[in-house]
Image (spheres, rainbow, N blue to C red):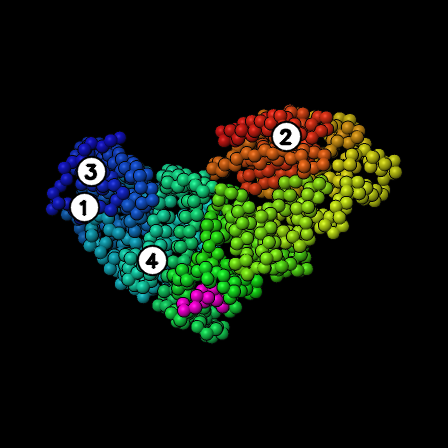
Amino acid sequence: MTLPPPASPAPVSDLRPEDILPDDLIAPAATIFDLPALRARLFDSLPAEGGEPAIRAATVRLLNEARHAGRETIAQAFAAQPRNAFPVTHAYTWVTDGLVRLCFEVATEVLHPRPNPTAGERLAVLAVGGYGRGEMAPHSDVDLLFLTPHKITAWAESVIESMLYMLWDLKLKVGHASRTVKDCLRLGAEDFTIRTAMLEHRYLIGHRPLAEDLDKRLWNDLFKGSERAFVAAKLEERGERHRKQGLRYVVEPNVKEGKGGLRDLQSLFWITKYIHRTDDTEAMVRLGVFRPEEYRTFHKAEEFLWATRCHMHLATGRAVEQLTFDMQVEVADRMGYVDKGGRRAVEWFMQDYFRHATAVGDLTRIFLTSLEAEHQKDAPLILRMFKRGPQVKDGYEVVHNRLAIIDPKAFLTDKMNLLRIFEEALRTGLLIHPDAMRLVKANLTLIDDDMRTDREAQRIFMDLMLKHGNPERALRRMNELGVLAAFIPEFEPIVAMMQFNMYHAFTVDEHTIQCIRHLSEIEHGDLTEELPVASHILREGVNRKVIYVALLLHDIGKGRDEDHAVLGAQIARRVAPRLGLGKQESATVEWLVRYHLLMSDMAQKRDIADPRTVRDFAKAVQTRERLDLLTVLTVCDIRGVGPGVWNNWKAALIRALYRQTRRALEDGMEALNRENRGTEAKRALREALADWDSKDLRTETQRHYDPYWQGLHITAHQVFARLLRDIQQDEIKIDIHPDEDRDATRVCFALQDHPGIFSRLAGALALSGANVVDARTFTSKDGYATAAFWIQDADGSPYESARIPRLRDTIRKTLLGEVKPREAIQSRDKLKKRERAFKVPTSITFDNEGSDIYTIIEVDTRDRPGLLYDLTRTLAEAHVYIASAVIATYGEQVVDSFYVKDMFGLKYFSPSKQRTLERKLRDAIAAGAERARA
């Protein structure tokens, strides 16, 4: 509703101090909330009859109109200046101040007037916490302190009650407390949270001398002399908060509570105010806490985080602090980010977010160092235990158990010291003193082309990765200070680069450092049981320079329009020699970067039971050295993606591909011959079923075609032998057992074969809520289908034994036709709201070279619960015979590879048939995607 024109302003001499319109808001204060004019309208409109309910209702009605109009003005102005956050937070504070003041005036002058109050009938209203600081997001809480001189009187109680009813009716989230000055001092002494809230008190309205008395008493009787205790409490809170929130680069960060978030900045404000008694953040520069350029970084980070938070509140209409995937897309758009350079707007936005979060972390460290120097914070425990620290080289000293630089000028005379300090830190096991970090960061321009090609610089850098046993610490600190990007400028674009998907848990630079951490752990023998193959390879020995540099550079090409592996290889060709690698070593690094996804793709997207898969992979790898290096790189790369991504399923695939390829490279490709593998499998089955009579055994070994023998493990052959023994024509036999080696549950079916059997089985499993990770089906010579599916539950784990009977029952009902998958699956085939922001372009390819017998149809698209059923049903309706399916899931993206033949047992060579099938598959994907979003 549009408000009438404002009343004529009162003469300046008549204005109360709180009525003076501020000039630092996102729009003119009078257009947001004209307090003097609104007061005049309000008091003119109050009804003479109807008592308190009518007066309150009239007050709320008018103030609600003003509040909505003001908020709309702020939102429109913010949309035009979407990164100008401080004038927005001040504007929301101004609106809230006006609402509280007018409610107080109505309560004290109209509802409960006291023309001549007694000394005990004094009341002051103060804003505390974030509201007291004058920083409000659109849906921030309104924390109020009602201050009385003595025990609360009936009059004060009535005023407070009337005020609260009006504020609640205005839909404000009010937090409130009624206290005397003594109460505030007592409770503040007991509870640091209360003390912090009162640290940021701000007078709003009422008896001002009472508020002034509280301010004086707080500083003189509570805050003074307790600085050390307050700082210790705030740092303990910060540590606990960080433990809960995890890494700074968590992909859905909490803007308020997360590492590098607003709460970290607020902690600095609190401590500064408590120690130096100032609200002026620029005082941090005058006090020597920050350099001017550091303060500018601080200011930019704060404004960016506040802008982000305000947009989140406006987008959702509530106080949301978690920057979820769907919210990231929305906020990026609101803040004016656009797609460019092969990256989505949301990825540019999140890169800026993480860089600001990193800056907040750096500034926090600097601030804490300043505190240590002033002895406001207890020295680290180890320093108190041992007065003498480790022996350090000339030019360094140990200060507060950290590596410090004695003479900054002398340090900077040799630019190699910008690298040597990290080497000395690793050698001594000391953390680098933040003053030394500041010096390094302020002088990154010394790292020039001459230094990058200097042999001593190359030696130091490589030793940081290879020699001191903790490459993760060195690389992470170098990355945080900008040294890594300065020494390898090609690394700079991937610093804090977010990959907008559900697969990668880290930014690209953090993922790279995580990969190197995993490599170091394998080298140290920490993962021998979990990673026997990779551990064995490293024990036998590889070129460590090559594997470390390849891992450092494997994703360096990300974020551009080009294939990141191809671009990364081109970058590696330049960077590897610059790091001191020889010609052959550099060529190997380039090859590893170019093909760093090859083993992962072959293992997860192809049927490694097919000899052709192994043969093609062996031809691509060519040498045992490359195979060993690529295997280790692949293991570290997958493990570095995020917690829970590496599992026994992937481990089994990588191990199997490695062992078969190594055998092919050492014994020749004929070692992979189908006939040999079939003969070995039959012999193994005869040995396992030695108690069977010869007739039954002969029936079993002769009833299957060759692909069956080389496509399944001996344990599955035994299961199917038992299921098929004495099977009746219309009987469906099911065996469900955990496959512990693969972190999955194996479901084996034996039943009469008929067209579309694979699709029916996939539908039955989809209805059970199972995720299929691998599947293959074979037809016996006597007309039975033997199908093996490996499934996991929604958490990516094998099914617990207690859930298997229900799983079996759902499957059986579906196969018997009691449940129709096509209808029943619709209600389950839905995407969660936070996952809808992810878009995966659909790609469908036909490969007639990857298998001797089958065409491989690879469907790369957006995953959803009913996708596999939709695809297999579409293929079945087109009379496509599916022999096996290999499913690789990468967060919201899935690659389903189907090994197929046409109804005549032939490959799909015809381009027209391929186009027809592709169209049908795309139509099914589009229809399912629309249904999932409905």
**Residue position for label 4:** 293
The stretch drawn in magenta includes residue 423: yes
From the viewer's perspective, tell me whether residue 920 is left or right of residue 905.
left
**Taking 43 as reference, is 819 above or below it?**
above
Q: Which mark lies nearer to you, 3 or 1?
A: 1
Q: Secondary structure at mark 4?
A: helix
**Taking 66 as reference, is 194 above or below it?**
below
**Residue position for label 1:** 20
Mark 4 or mark 1: whose residue is earlier in sequence: 1
Could you tell me residue 51's position as x and y percent?
Answer: 22, 34
Q: Predominant secondary structure in magenta?
A: helix
**Residue position for label 2:** 872
In terms of image quadrants, where is residue 761? Answer: top right
- The answer to which of 312 and 552 lies nearer the viewer is 552
- The answer to which of 533 and 774 lies nearer the viewer is 533
| Residue at 41% in and 58% down | 362
| The N terminus, quarter of image | top left
Mark 4 or mark 2: whose residue is earlier in sequence: 4
**What range of the chain is rendered magenta?**
412-425
Q: Are marks 3 and 4 in contact (CB under 8 Å)?
A: no
Could you tell me residue 725's position as x and y percent?
Answer: 81, 34
Could you tell me residue 389's position as x and y percent?
Answer: 48, 73
| Residue at 52% in and 65% down | 455
**Residue type, label 2:** Thr
Q: Secondary structure at mark 2?
A: helix
Between the C-alphas of marks 4 and 2, the distance is 60 Å
- The answer to which of 794 and 535 lies nearer the viewer is 535
